[in-house]
Image: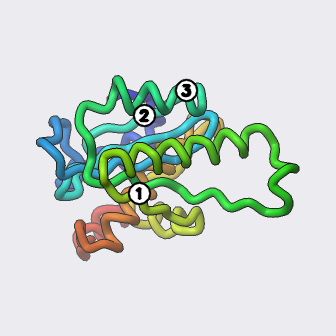
Amino acid sequence: MPFPVSPIQQKAINNLRNLGVYQERPVGKRGAYLVVDPGVTSGWALFSGNGYLVDWGQISGGVSGMALFLQEDLKEVPDAIIYEVYQIRGLAQNLPPAAKVTLAVIALLKKFGKGHEIPTPGMQASNKPVAERWTRLTPQGPHSQSHWVDAVNHGWYFLVTKRIVIPTIVWAKEFAS
């Protein structure tokens, strides 16, 4: 696993593995979804085309870190890049520096998507609680280490709502224990 996880998060990942929605294997050509929780530290998750969680982690360094990730670490161009929408409240000139970095990371993701002719749909932050109920994967520890969890949950929400993955009653029973 590319990023340290807490025992509770490891249990949730093991449950995903047992249910057949997580596999430690490379993704084939195309047919993958990159999900990003953008920011100064960005979380990311990579899902295969049929909804398997393949890899995840965090990227520090804001825009330059994300640019390096897209150029050097991302092995193949995904079919879509899904990101958490960042909403501006108030005047744009009053944004804190971290908010400006988040917006710049989103712009970079959109530019990358446009350059590779792939969609870049945004996911609302309000979807996370629903996805957390489905995955039972919640942030543990300091906020600085939770971004990858948000990316996994956004990805799962996207896959379910787009009917790429369909949760079953088995899913609910598995997490009830």
**57 above or below 68?**
below
Q: Amino acid at mark 2?
A: Gly
Identify the secondary structure beneath mark 1. loop
Q: Residues within 10 Å of mark 1 (few under 14, many from 20)?
A: many
Q: Nearer the viewer, residue 162 or 20?
A: 162
Q: Which residue is mark 3?
A: 64
Question: Percent from the top left, x then y, of residue 37?
Answer: 52, 47
User: Of 143 and 104, which appears nearest the observer?
Assistant: 104
Return the x and y of residue 111 as percentages of the image width and height: 46, 46
Residue 35, compared with residue 67, is above or below; it is below
Disc 1 to disc 3, how far (Cα)? Answer: 19 Å
Confirm whether residue 15 shows in the render.
no
Horizontal side, residue 109 vs residue 38: left or right: left
Q: Nearer the viewer, residue 66 or 54?
A: 66
Q: Which sits in the foreground, 14 or 102?
A: 102
Q: According to the image, label 1 marks what residue?
A: 120
Image coords of residue 176 (percent x, y): 37, 66
Residue under circle 2? 57
